[in-house]
Image (cartoon, rainbow, N blue to C red):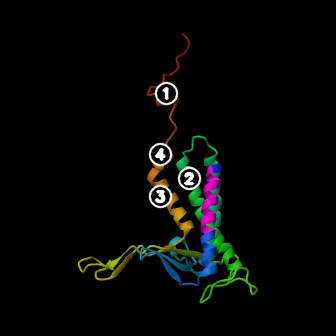
């Protein structure tokens, strides 16, 4: 359980520290290069899901926020349940901790950033502004900043559907929380057989066939 708590604390600290720094030092749309044109810090905000996806306006926003809270509660419960079992694989605890921390990190934005900051349009936001925040509880926006436009080009003329159109990989702008969720889910998909395999009996571990007990003669 200590390992899970350390992972959650580390992810939340990195996620919230990076978001608060961006929010209080940059305005929307501002960017700077970290590694040429391959890695850029680009400040954007989104109303929806991970990687800037949207979900149905204001009604969708509140529904998504409530869903996130319920999902995080379920993930947290399952994580505690699995972490307390000695037979649980360490990798599963790590993956669950990453997913939980990432989901919680984005919930904090949605729940509180609208109350704690004013907006970032054409200005650098203030923390606890006198005039109040830019949105009520659960209506805040998620801060994104990690942008990796690694490959840019044009689809060849023979390419179906997108012939001659420009392409960019990787287009979405995301954050530390999104990364943690993606890594956690990826670990579970890749190693699910190892994480959820049934524990072997002592006889199977020794390469022996269990002997059925016989009755008294």
Residue furthest right in the image: 130
The residue wearing badge 1 is 203
Please provide the residue range marked out in magenta: 3-16
Asked which secondary structure carries label 4, the reply is: helix
Q: Quadrant of the C terminus?
A: top right
Marked residue nearer the N-terminal end (4 or 3): 3
State the separation of the CA atoms marked 3 and 2. Answer: 12 Å
User: Quick check: can you spot residue 63?
Assistant: no
Contact between marks 1 and 2 (CB within 8 A): the answer is no
In front: 31, or 63? Answer: 31
The residue labelled by disc 3 is: 186
Residue furthest to the bottom in view is 122
- CA gap between label 3 and label 1 equals 33 Å
Label 2 sits on residue: 94
Disc 3 or 2, which lies upstream in sequence?
A: 2
Q: Nearer the viewer, residue 199 or 152?
A: 152
Determine the CA span between mark 1 and mark 2.
30 Å
Question: Pointers 4 and 3 in contact (CB under 8 A)?
Answer: no
Q: CA distance from mark 4 to mark 2?
A: 14 Å
Quarter of image, res 177: bottom right
Name the one closer to the observer, 71 or 12: 12
Residue that carries the numbered disc 4 in the rendered image: 194
Which element carries disc 1, helix, strand or loop?
helix
Mark 1, residues whose alpha carbon is within 10 Å: few (<14), some, or many (≥20)?
few
- The residues tagged by marks 1 and 4 sit, at their Cα atoms, a distance apart of 20 Å
């Amino acid at each position: 359980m200590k390992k899970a708590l350390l992972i959650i604390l580390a992810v939340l600290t990195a996620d919230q520290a990076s978001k608060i720094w961006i929010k209080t030092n940059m305005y929307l749309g501002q960017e700077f290069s970290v590694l040429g044109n391959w890695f850029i810090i680009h400040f954007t905000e989104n109303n929806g899901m991970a990687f800037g996806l949207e979900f149905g306006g204001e009604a969708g926003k509140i529904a998504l926020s409530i869903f996130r809270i319920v999902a995080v509660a379920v993930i947290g419960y399952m994580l505690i349940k699995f972490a307390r079992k000695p037979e649980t694989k360490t990798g599963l605890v790590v993956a669950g901790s990453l997913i939980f921390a990432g989901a919680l990190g984005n919930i904090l934005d949605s729940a509180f950033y609208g109350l704690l900051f004013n907006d970032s349009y054409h200005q650098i936001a203030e923390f606890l502004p006198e005039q109040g925040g830019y949105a009520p509880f659960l209506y805040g926006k998620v801060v994104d900043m990690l942008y990796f436009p690694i490959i840019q080009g044009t689809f060849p003329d023979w390419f179906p559907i997108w012939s001659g159109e420009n392409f960019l990989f990787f287009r979405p702008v995301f954050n530390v929380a999104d990364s943690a969720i993606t890594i956690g889910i990826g670990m579970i998909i890749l190693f699910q057989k190892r994480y959820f395999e049934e524990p072997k009996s002592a006889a199977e571990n020794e390469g022996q066939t269990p002997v059925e007990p016989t009755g008294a003669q």
